[in-house]
Image (cartoon, rainbow, N blue to C red):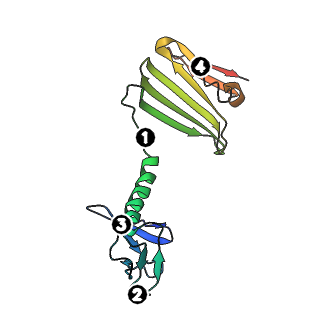
Amino acid sequence: MLKVGFIVDGVRWIIGQRPARAVPLCPRDYIELDLHLDDYTDNEYTSKKLQCEKCNKIYSIPRFVYYEKQFILKEINSRTYKTMHFINIDNEATPIAESKVSSKDNRFFVVSRLMESKTGLRLVVYAGEKGKKEKTQIFVEPEIKRLSFDQKDQHPTDVFTKLEAIFSDGTKVSQEK
């Protein structure tokens, strides 16, 4: 299993298990850092310094050690949260299926999401050039017989040059610019 550590505020951190805890490591010696105590501090709630027992180097951190450990856990968790898909249980739109496709040269993308919304099934198609903010969004709502696009984004004809549709009876139709 691949082990991953993190560098935050110049200190290496690993996450211990059961319960999760942040453990600071010396960036040079990879030994666990100790709390650096001086005349003004006596615990991790009042110290902003960590010390390596091996090389005696002292590392200053921006928060008290206790709060830095909490911050590290939150920061690492946020990386996981960013990759999660969220299901809206407020009856807005619940994703059912998703598909992502890129062009052969990996320059363009198309993402389609089928969702269940208040008005029924909704297909949302996002498309555009990778790395650019401009994109188009097309909305298909078959139960209310509506096809629309997001007015704030690019017009679909600015992005697509060919559209192909396959109907329920197997008929295939394509349209080119």
Q: Which residue is mark 4?
A: 148
Up/down of 59 relative to 122, above or below: below
Q: Which circle's residue, 4 or 3, is located before the other in the chain?
A: 3
Mark 2 vs mark 3: in front: 3
Dot 4: element: strand
The Cα–Cα distance between marks 4 and 1, rounded to whole angstroms, is 24 Å
Residue found at x 56% / y 38%: 101
Q: Which circle's residue, 4 or 1, is located before the other in the chain?
A: 1
Q: Amino acid at mark 4?
A: Ser
For this orientation, the residue located farthest to the front is: 40
Q: Which circle's residue, 2 or 3, is located before the other in the chain?
A: 2
Mark 2 vs mark 4: in front: 2
Quarter of the image for the C terminus: give it.
top right
10 Å neighbourhood of mark 1: few (<14), some, or many (≥20)? few
The Cα–Cα distance between marks 2 and 4, rounded to whole angstroms, is 65 Å
Mark 1 vs mark 2: in front: 2
The Cα–Cα distance between marks 2 and 3, rounded to whole angstroms, is 22 Å
Q: Is residue 168 visible?
A: no
Q: Nearer the viewer, residue 72 or 44?
A: 44
Task: Look at the numbered discs 2 and 3 and tell me whether their residues touch, using CB distance below 8 Å.
Answer: no
Looking at the picture, how far across and down is residue 176, in whole percent? Answer: 71, 23
Q: Which residue is mark 3?
A: 66
Q: Which residue is mark 1?
A: 85
Task: Look at the numbered discs 1 and 2 and tell me whether their residues touch, using CB distance below 8 Å.
Answer: no
For this orientation, the residue located farthest to the right is: 177
Quarter of the image for the N terminus: give it.
bottom left
Q: Is residue 127 visible?
A: yes
Mark 3 vs mark 1: in front: 3
Q: Amino acid at mark 1?
A: His
